[in-house]
Image (spheres, rainbow, N blue to C red):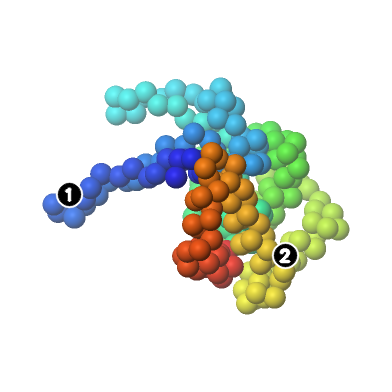
Amino acid sequence: MARFRHHYPQLQRPPAPDGSSSAPLELHYSLGPGVSGKLLTGEDLLRDSFVKEWNGVRIRVPSPEHLVTHLILHSQLRHCYSERIFPPLRAMFDHVMLNRHYGSSLDWEEVRRRFRTHRRGPTLLLHLLQAREKLGLPLPFAFELGGIGQLRWVRRRALNRWPMLRFADPVYVVSSSLSRRMRFLKSVVAAPGGWKHAARMLFRSGFYRRLLADIALR
């Protein structure tokens, strides 16, 4: 897994005799492949973080702008196809809580600049509109989507209202399943000896079950 993913296998203590268990822990060596790792690098994250003492342990907390940036790119870009149609409610709620906690000290123009620099401005804007529509979060700055942006927002709202439409939307089907899988296969093949893993993957029924699940659930 470490050869082809952006994090190591999840770590978790075995359940205690009483059935309780600990929170899982993922050690990441990248925020994600492709645009995710470029939009917010580990170097950026560490450079602007601040040190806190917590239960006798010194930890680093990312800046407010980086926390929001990571939350949005993780929700909209990393865990599925680009510009997710159905953002997780948890991600939008965390967005509300971060905005409430940091208030005016959160520099939204810096967040906006970062997304724009990497040509992902619409990703940010659509996420903000989604959070306003679902949870009533005020927009942090005024903006115009433009003609294409308006069409994309209408499409997203239509797919949210009538989810079955996604099966007839070729852009959705390709983006939510095929393009994501092809990017992963490309990263596998690029690794030494990775073509053997890719060949075995293509002949496993689980690969195609997950492919169909991506289309149905994203």
Question: Position of 93 compared to 41: left or right?
Answer: left
Q: Write down the quadrant of residue 43 in the picture.
A: top right
On the image, the x and y values in percent for residue 2 come to 45, 40
Residue under the point 49% across and 57% down: 200
Is residue 2 or residue 95 the one in the foreground? 2
Is residue 104 or residue 202 the one in the foreground? 202
- Kind of residue sitting beneath label 1: Ala
Disc nearer the start of the sequence (1/2): 1
Q: Is residue 99 visible?
A: no
Tell me the mark number nearer the camera, choosing from 1 and 2.
2
Q: Furthest residue to the left?
A: 17
- Kind of residue sitting beneath label 2: Val
Element type at marker 1? loop
On the image, the x and y values in percent for residue 188 come to 55, 46
State whether residue 170 is above or below residue 182. Answer: below
Dot 1 crowding, Cα within 10 Å, few <14, some 14–19, many 20+: few
Residue under the point 53% across and 45% down: 194
Which disc number belongs to residue 71?
none
State whether residue 129 is above or below residue 168. Answer: above
Which disc number belongs to residue 171?
2
Q: Furthest residue to the right?
A: 147
- Residue named by callout 1: 16
